[in-house]
Amino acid sequence: MKNYLFICFVFFITLYNTTPFVGAQCDGQPSKYPIYNEAATFVNQTQNGKLYIIGPPDNQVNIIELYGTPYEMGYAQGVLLKNEIHDIFGNFFPYITTMLNNLITKYADYLPKFLIDALEKGGIKLALDITYELTKKYTPQSFYDEMKGISDGSGIDYNTILQIHMFPELIKAACSMVGAYDTATANNGLLQLRALDFGADATNPMRLHPLVTVYHPNAGSGHSFTTLTWAGFLGTLTGYSQHMAICEKYWYGYNGTSSREGIPWHFLLREILQYDESIDEALNRIYNSERTCSIFVGLGSNETNTFKAVEYSHEYVRVFDDQTPFPAAPQPAAHPNIKDVVYIDKFVQPSNHQCLGALLQKSVGSIDVQTLIDVSSQLQTGDLHIGIFDFQNNQMYVSVASQQGPYPPPSNFTLIPAYDRQFLQIDLNQFLNNNNNNSN
C-alpha cells in the first residue's frame, strides 16, 4: 500500500515500549537546580547568521540567529554549525538502522508489508525516498531551498539532508504538554510546557547538539520565531513566536483512516509559527492542509492569552479547551478539568496516571515557571528536551539531555535526561526583536 506513509512505522517503537503507570504518586522529585539566568555569549557570525552559546560548561546549548531567504538562512546555519551537523548526520543512519533491525525482529506482524519489503530491498534510505515521493507536492518549496542551503554551507550531500527530514516521526513520542493561563497562573499570563519524551539513550545522536534557532525571514515572509531542535534540522516540534507557541504529542489511540500523502506535520507546525498570529489562524491552516500522521498539537496564543489542544489526523480535527472532556467521555478521574489549564501527560490517552493532574490542581492559581519545571521532574517527562515559554515576559526556558562524553559513548556512559538537568533561561526580547544581522 504505497499511500501508507513510511515514517509512521515508529509509532510501534513507543507504543509497545510504553506502559502507563497507575497510582497517585509521582515517580520523581521537584528539581534540585536553580534556573541558569546568565546571558548568552556571542561566538561567531557569517553573512545572514550569528551564533551564540548559553549555559555552564557541562550544559551548553547553541543559539543561532538566521536572516534572509530560506536558502540564505540554511546556508548560514550550514557554515556556522558545520561540525555539529556532520556529527549528528554522520551518526544518524547507523543509529536508525540498529533501531529498525530491532523493530522488525520484534514487531514484524504489526508493520505494513510494503515497509518491510522496502527495508529488505533497499534499507532505510529507500523507505525514506518513498516518503519524499509521497509528500513532495504538499511541501512548500521554501523547505527544500533551506535544505539546499544547509547542504551547500555544510558540505553534506543534499539527498542525505532530504532523507533525514523525511524522518520526523522518529521523535513523535510519549510527550507531555501543559498550557496554563489567566486565573491559573501567578501572573495571569500564559505559560506553556512542552516535554519531549523519546526514550533517549546515550547512542542517540540527537542528544549531541541541541539548538535554539531564531529565524528572521525577509519582509513579507512571516514574522520572527524560534524553535528548539538540533543542528541541521529545520522542522519544528517545539517553538515560539511573540504570537503563538506550538508543541506536539503522538496520538496513540487514533484508529481512523490514514492517507499518507500530505505535508509533513513538523513543516506545518513551523508554518504556524512563521505566519499565524492567533489560534483561529493556526486552526484554519490545520483544517485546510492535507494531514498525514495522527498527533496531538498544543497551540498557545498571545492574542487571547489561552491554550488549546488539538486532535490532528487525516480524517478530522477536534479542539479541546479547559472545559472539554479530554480526550473522550467518560473523562478519566485522573484527568479532571481545571479552570484555565489544558494538559496531556506522556502516557497513552485516556490516561489514568494521576501525577500531572494532581500537581496542576495543587498549584492552580499560582502556577509559574518553577512549577512547570518541578512538574517535568516529578512526572519524569521530557527525557530528550523540554521547552517552557513565558508569553507575558517573552522568556524561554530550555533543558536538554546530557551531551558530554565521547561518541559513540562507552558502555558505562549514563545519559542524564532533560528533566533531571538545570534549565537555561533565554531572554527572547534580545533575539526576536533583533532584526539587524550585522550587530553582535
Image (cartoon, helix red, strand yellow):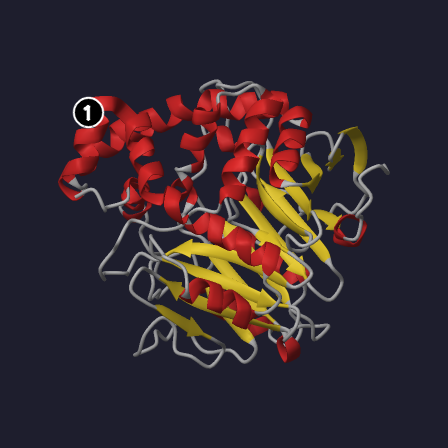
Quadrant where the image shows the C terminus = top right
Q: Secondary structure at mark 1?
A: helix
- Left or right: 11 as drawn, with respect to 242: left
Q: Quadrant of residue 97?
A: top left
Q: Position of residue 339 (x, y in %)?
A: 54, 80
For the point 52% across and 19% down, the residue is 407
Per the image, the residue denoted by label 1 is: 120
State whether residue 306 appears in this view. yes
User: x%, y% of residue 89?
Assistant: 49, 24
Which amino acid, mark 1?
A: Glu
**Is residue 375 visible to us here?**
no
Most foreground residue, 24 or 189 = 189
Q: Residue 132's spot in the image, x, y percent? A: 36, 37
Count of residue discs: 1
| 190 on left or right of 48 | left
Where residue 149 appears, as percent x and y from the top left, is 59, 30
